[in-house]
Image (tube, rainbow, N blue to C red):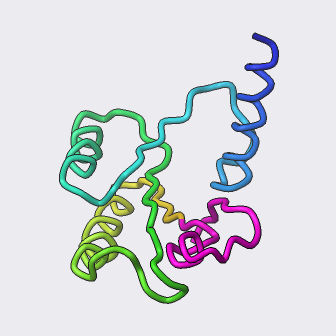
């Protein structure tokens, strides 16, 4: 149990550092993992309409190559130009994450470095 609590504490500290929550607080953080699709967007809209707490919305963009998104252009247009501005206008913090390695780097055998997420 103690080991689990230490792990949770380290994860909270990393989340604080990566996503700018400030000091680690003794409260639950409400984070929505948002795919940019209708179901996860509807969950965020419902949370907003019902005044549910929401500290952070995370969108993970898969990159095919260094400058080429793995997402459809229309999807990224919707995410970047419609949803993110709307969620931010409601006062929600939105972060886009990308893996340090692209799809091509991951599956072409070019396996250099550690595959970790970074905020964009």
Q: Residue furthest bottom?
A: 67
Q: Residue 99 in the image: state x and y as whole percent.
A: 58, 66
How many labels, in total?
0
Q: Give the residue at x 69% y 32%.
A: 25
Q: Residue 77 in the image: state x and y as whole percent.
A: 27, 79
Part of the protein shown in magenta = 98-120
Report if residue 7 lies within the magenta region: no
Q: Quadrant of the N terminus?
A: top right
Q: Residue 52 in the image: state x and y as whole percent.
A: 34, 33
Report if residue 116 lies within the magenta region: yes
- Asked if residue 53 is positioned above or below residue 42 in the image, the reply reads above
Q: Quadrant of residue 59?
A: bottom left
Q: Residue furthest front?
A: 109
Q: Give the residue at x 25% y 42%.
A: 43
Drawn side of residue 53 relative to residue 97, left or right: left
Residue 101 vs residue 9, the one in the foreground: 101
Q: Quadrant of the C terminus?
A: bottom right
Q: Residue furthest top?
A: 1
- Asked if residue 105 is positioned above or below residue 59 in the image, the reply reads below
Q: Give the residue at x 33% y 58%.
A: 87
- Asked if residue 81 is positioned above or below residue 54 in the image, the reply reads below
Q: Give the residue at x 29% y 60%.
A: 36
Q: Residue 60 in the image: state x and y as whole percent.
A: 46, 61
């Amino acid at each position: 149990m103690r080991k689990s609590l230490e792990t949770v504490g380290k994860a909270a500290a990393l989340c604080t550092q990566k996503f700018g929550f400030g000091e680690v607080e003794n409260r639950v953080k409400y984070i929505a993992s948002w795919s940019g699709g209708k179901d996860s967007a509807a969950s965020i809209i419902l949370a907003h309409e019902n005044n549910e707490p929401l500290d952070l919305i995370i969108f993970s963009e898969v990159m095919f190559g260094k400058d080429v998104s793995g997402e459809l252009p229309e999807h990224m247009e919707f995410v970047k130009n419609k949803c993110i501005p709307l969620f931010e206008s409601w006062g929600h913090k939105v972060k886009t994450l990308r893996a340090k390695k692209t799809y091509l780097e991951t599956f072409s055998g070019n396996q250099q470095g550690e595959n970790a997420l970074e905020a964009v």
